[in-house]
Amino acid sequence: MSNQSLAQSGPVFSWLNQRTAGVLLHPTAFPGSQGIGVLDGAADKFLDFLAASGVRTWQICPLGPTGYGDSPYQCFSAFAGNPYLIDLQALVDSGLLDAADLAPLQQLPRDHVDFGWLYVTKWPALFKAFEAFKAAGRPALYGDFAAFKTDKASWLGAFTLFLAMKDHFGGRPWWEWPAEVRFHAQAAKSPLAAELADAAEAHAFFQYLFFGQWSRVRARARELGIEIIGDAPIFVARDSADVWSHPRLFQVDQATGRPLAVAGVPPDYFSATGQLWGNPLYAWDAHATDGYTWWIERLRANFALCDIVRIDHFRAFDTYWSIPADAADARGGKWLNGPGLDFFLKVKAALPDARMIAEDLGELFPSVVELRDATGLPGMTILQFAFGGESSNLYLPHNLRANSAVYPGTHDNDTTLGWYASTDEKTRDHVRRYLRVDGREVGWDFIRTAYASVSNLAVIPFQDILSLGSEARLNTPGEPAGNWQWRYHAGRLAQLQTETAPYLRQLGELYAR
């Protein structure tokens, strides 16, 4: 059955039927004294602000363990959590650490994340907590540790062995490891696996802490009536436990691990040479053979953490940009067919209540739109992409669809104030004329426009609520360093609680969100 004929018989998914508002903020941006945002009281205060504002959804970036480049879209696992988010003060309170163990972290900057220094200060504290955990007889801090390991057994063992071996080999990627441990199937049977059992157990403990603390935050969100929108990058990092443990599911040489082709996108709004992401591409035939089991388990894991999942780079399920593995940039790639509608039918059968958002940005062929409409998934609209052109621009408010999520910008965009200051005068003039504003408060003009739009979901980056400029940009696509570092100051949230929350609540009431 074609995408079009299925769309005529009804969409696969249909869930975004009520108007609501959300805020986009990654937890690493929380304020605090541990060098990075963690899952502590700052999360509670942020949730309290959302509740006071009448905001019922909180969108985050992926929660996975980040590696080189610190991007949550290039993680060591598509299933694991990020130990950097663990609140160490909770471990002091439980007796696993001393207050002095947090002192090195308290010397780190508070206005941004210094990942280099975070690496050399947080990991020693985490390993010390593990030693204390063992010595104390493995107390049930967040439920039974053994039960946790059993619950996560489908991925936890391979992931923890992967990180233990990565530590053992000085951080080198798995394809540079000795042949006898180059893939998980052999490594799990090797003498080295037994030698590293305690190190692997430490990484399992860190996951236990992350999931325990995240469960607390999610429970608090539920108490306040707030749903969490998670994020599933379509591709996984090459240097990940996912590729190491399931090489047959990826386009890599099954003996050496060398990629046969890699992911990216052709030249676009963000880059004249395209974006060369370097992720290994999926061997979709292998996934189809077993009914997309790995993907379904991945989504199931996402829904265990969040209520709604944004599917990053949705268009690659229709066609994806395949770049030669040795290419210098993304211009020499070609479009190949993805799994199409069959994938979403299998997901629907396995996860009938799944609520997903399709990140359908970028170059959209008619077949991509057809697939999105056949699935019934809401797409995304970016207001920063709407202005400076013709009235037919699909992102202009008069062209929006109810079954969509509208954003002033996302984690990949500049803040609205930064964008407006750096764009050309033609675009600024279009903004002023279209919105009938003078441009002096364009950040709030975009917020009101998103709230007023026909899109059933309006999501506002927290930086725009704070009226911040380019200094608060979280990520610049194509730039390998300097991203994911921004954090807000605790004092700003207290100010917003009294001044801004009532106004956002009024906007929600005015526009039925």
Image: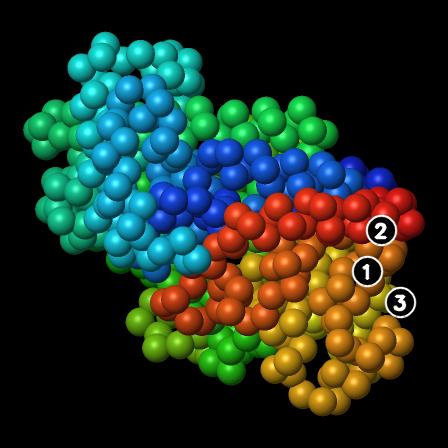
Question: Which element type, helix, strand or loop, lies under badge 1?
Answer: helix
Check disc 2 and report the residue beneath it.
507
Residue at image coords 28%, 38%: 102
Residue at image coords 13%, 49%: 170
Image position, residue 311 (x, y; %): 60, 48
Question: Which element type, helix, strand or loop, lies under badge 2?
Answer: helix
Q: Which residue lies furthest to the bottom in this view?
A: 425
Check disc 3 and report the residue beneath it.
398
Check disc 1 and report the residue beneath it.
448
Residue at image coords 65%, 64%: 467
Which amino acid lies under the numbered mark 3 shown in the image of this protein? His
Report, in whole angstroms, how far the alpha carbon at label 2 lies from the one at label 1: 7 Å
Q: Earlier in the sequence, mark 2 or mark 3?
A: 3
Vertical order, 96 against 467 (above or below)? above
> In screen coordinates, is 209 left or right of 179?
right
Which amino acid lies under the numbered mark 1 shown in the image of this protein? Arg
